[in-house]
Amino acid sequence: MRATVWSGRNKVQVENVPDPKILNSRDAIVKISSTAICGSDLHLYDGYVPAMRKGDILGHEFMGEVVETGSDVGNLAVGDRVVVPFPIACGACNACSRELWSLCENSNPNASMAEKLWGDSTAGIFGYSHITGGYAGGQAEYARVPFADVGPIKIESDLSDEQVLFLSDVLPTGYMGAELCDIKPGDVVAVWGCGPVGQFAIASAYLLGAERVIAIDRFEYRLRMAREKAGAETIDYEQTSVREALREMTGGRGPDHCIDSVGLEAHHHQPAMYAYDRVKQATRMETERPYALREAILNCRNGGTVSIMGVYGGFVDKFPIGAVMNRALTIRTGQCHVHRYLRPLLQRIENGDIDPSFIVTHRMSLDDAPTGYETFKNKQDECVKVVLTP
Amino acid sequence: MSVGKSGSAAPADPLARGLGVFSLTLGLPQIAAPGRVNRLIGVRDDATTRMWMRIVGAREIAAGVGIFSTRRPKGWVWARVAGDTLDLALLGLALRGRSDRPNRTLAAAGAVAGAFAADVLDGVRLSRGTDGAQEQQPEQQPEAPIHLRAAITVNRDRNDLYALWRDFEGLPRFMAHLDEVRAGDDGRSHWTAHGPMGMTVSWEAETTEDVPGERIAWRSLEGAKVHTSGTVRFVPAPGDQGTEVHLEMRYELPGGAIGSMLAKLFGEEPAIQVKDDMRRFKQIAETGEVVRSDATPEGALGRRVVKQRPAKPLAEEQLAEVGAEGAS
């Protein structure tokens, strides 16, 4: 089959690789109909995640048709149309029983690797480096889906791929970012980053009852999408002081909740600051550039919530812990427990509360994945989301 | 929890260490202040003698550093012998023409002769292999025992977990170092571990404790090639979280080829390997199988963490190689 393979820093290529086989009795093989490039794939693409190997198949947002099932998969049949959640979860361990699906205790065979970096392991994740298990990803013609009796959700209505594909990751991730804020009527939510997760965090904050949502980015086309499609007020941080604008917009209080949907490769509008952390990151003195996170913490209202949905991998410098402690901020975070949100969010889509397809800006053939990565990474051609079809 | 490997590279032999210190303390002033050393040993101080003094000093430092950089300094000690010979020749030359105070030069030659004797003695000892460094090699003497502990919480009733473990023949499903266990009906069992390059080692064990739902203990029989013992305990976890499984195992490494094979089997980090064993036990108990990914098609495996396959599907023949074919 053809698959998008990481072949070194800033290099992917579409290669012929062996077709996936059933390895465990609870596996299914899915013939992929649509797959997307995620912002977190860009962190793998440009080599900021250390546990990548040349030859790894990328991709953790995918859907398609079941073409084979292992002997213990009773709930799926060949021909079923399914969306596959990005964390792999067994459904039986303590974490899964507590609905902490992205912390499944059984699905990462490289748990000891994760334990060294993070103190303990997370669930396995498709196409997301060896530290989360070394699973082949879904930017391919076929994928092997472990614990297929637990994860994939059947799509039985005639919704289009683009309407349901994002159930695999970015829609529930944005939703969880907002849900972790425990939004109450009258709350103001600020969202850093207007990529796909940011857009869905904005939309979800409104669904969960936020009074106002303020979105922060520097690309006008993304801010426009946040205004027009998700309904946010916007701040361009290259034009305006974020701090002053937020204080002004909230009567001096600051936003009640701040959602970081940027993560470890943040950009800084002051070239010197940006260069400083880029150098430290390049020389491995720190693994992240945490501007968005620092800014979210420093601007959050006293006693408010900072919800981290952007991806971080290792260690940051100058983390404003004094602000967190003295101003009684709550930090909530985690890889999304996608399984928890699949059914309720599918319901929301079917009800017409949200149509996630608005983020799609680029549709390409799987063979054009290398162009897709470059376009997305460099934010060319007003790119927000690339969907690939094998 | 370690395999009793010494972390230090310094020689174990005290005489070799002494000679190394001697080389360094002599070499430094020879390089830094050759004129003073010349005067001390009564050699005329000029450009030529200073140059030679520096050369001799550099050689001393090389020998000293060399001795300290290895646990087996035999070669460096013999290098000192060669150096002593050179020194004696140089001092002889000096006595014939460049000595201002022949008595001092003679005394220096006497000191070098003494060092020469010590060097030859140590060189011979090291070459015969009767020094400490040689004796500590696993081929000669048992290493410290491997003592392993690991605990994991499994979301299952302890009676189920006890039954899963009590089926000794199933242990190799999750214990990476075991190849086969055959259970007899007399409480005894025959264990085989599969080592690098096709080596195997077997031993007989007996069950010493067997409390259903609570604990199992075993140990190798008197006279077995491998001295090992282990206990696994099943304790209810607090709340509604199943069972804590506590494992303790001990392997006395017997020395010789079997000992070094077992040490290799457990690798650099035996604690990680046994934790992975426990993870596989949990996978089997909770999900029914050992979980496989494309990078680790044989399931969690300590060694595979270091040497991953790429995360892409394996070809049919590779699957057969790792024993992962035909799971459907």
Image (cartoon, helix red, strand yellow):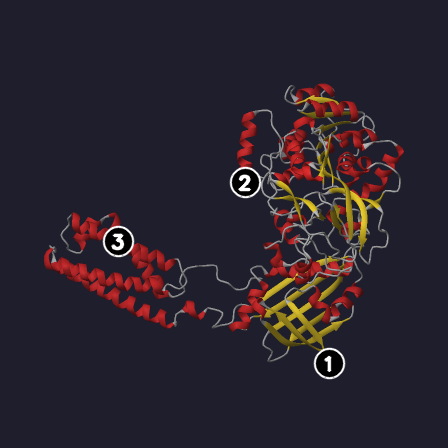
Q: Which element is circle 1 on?
A: loop
Hey, what amino acid is under mark 3? Gly
Labels 1, 3: one chain: yes
- Near mark 1 (Cα within 10 A), the count class, few <14, some 14-19 or many ≥20, is few
The residue carrying mark 2 is A284
Q: Specify the amino acid type for callout 2.
A: Arg
State the image coordinates of residue A91 (x, y, percent, origin top left): 80, 52
- Residue that mark 1 sits on: B186
**In which quadrant of the rendered view does residue A179 lie?**
top right
Disc 3 is placed on an element classified as helix
Q: CA distance from mark 3 to mark 2?
A: 41 Å
Quadrant of image for the C terminus of chain B: bottom right
Q: Chain of mark 2?
A: A
Q: For residue B218, what is the image quadrant?
A: bottom right
Neighbor class of circle 3 (other Cα within 10 Å; few <14, some 14-19, many 20+) is many
- Residue type, mark 1 in image: Asp
Q: Residue at x 85, y 51 (%)?
A: A77
Left or right, B192 with reference to A171: left
